[in-house]
Amino acid sequence: MRPLIVVNFKTYETAHGVGAEQLARAMEVADSSTDLADFVAVVSAFDLSSVVAAAPSLQVWTQHLDPVGFGSNTGWLHPSTAMERGASGTIINHAEHKVSLDHVENLLEQLPEGFPVCACAADLDEARALAALAPTMIAVEPPELIGGDVSVTTADPEIVSGTAAIVKSVNPDVRVLCGAGVKNGADVAMAIKLNTEGVLLASGVTKSTEPEKVLADLVSNL
Ligand code: G3P
């Protein structure tokens, strides 16, 4: 499988509403310009429909889902509605939106086979516990490095390779990503060298004045 470049739009001003559509289109171009990696946009639930319409060939995920069904669940993010609106995957348990292991387990039980779920882990223990639940992938992101200028692959390479080793020892089918501070092609190449299968990043793309250049650079060392 090709490495994954997963860009989390969070609630960045440049990556919401019309900005989300523009960034997704730039990602769609980057995605179709390379066979070396697959790009994924992770957008606000509010922006799912418009982003999917703007960039129909791009994988678009939601940033969170709740394990609820149809019925009286005010304000929760209902998986079936997200899928109807074009979500083709989700992240869960992001450092900025933590949930319990039960939440992750119940969600995995509810989602259809083949719907990618990327569970985020802050450290090796959390990665081990999440791996036992068999999500599609686990992204390790030390919270203190999120949004910073130094990539986790430089600041703490051991947590990256250590997570890959632990996750694979629990369940070899779970893919491993890393994130926090990832900004360029050298960081992505190092992530792969440290035995991951891709990266999860945000500010390197969303805060750039030239996102097209950054997106092209991310795959330039693969
Ligand atoms: O979800 C990705 C994220 O938490 C990493 O953010 O800004 O460090 O790339 P950033």
Image (spheres, rainbow, N blue to C red):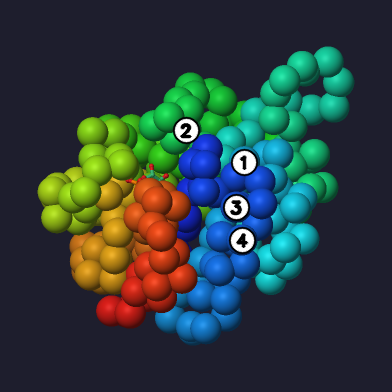
Crowding around mark 2 (Cα neighbors within 10 Å: few <14, some 14 to 19, many 20+) is: many
| Distance (Cα) linking label 4 and label 2 | 27 Å
First reached walking from the N terminus: tag 4 or tag 1: 4
Within-10-Å neighbours for mark 3: few <14, some 14–19, many 20+: some
SS label for mark 4: helix
Identify which residue is drawn at 67% across, 39% down: 45
Q: Can you say whether 99 is above or below 216 in the image?
A: above
Query: In the rendered view, would you say 106 is above or below 42?
Result: above
Q: Earlier in the sequence, mark 1 or mark 3?
A: 3
Q: Nearer the viewer, mark 4 or mark 1?
A: 4
Amino acid tagged 2: Asn
Categorize mark 4 by other alpha carbons within 10 Å: few (<14), some (14-19), many (20+): some
**Which residue shows up at 43% across the image and 81% down it?**
36
In-image side of 109 versus 70 (left or right): left
Mark 1 CB within 8 Å of ligand 1: no
| Label 3 sits on residue | 19
Asked whether the residues under the numbered discs 3 and 4 touch, taking CB atoms below 8 Å apart as contact, a structural biologist would say yes
Please give the residue where the numbered disc 4 appears in the rendered image. 22
Q: According to the image, label 2 marks what residue? A: 93
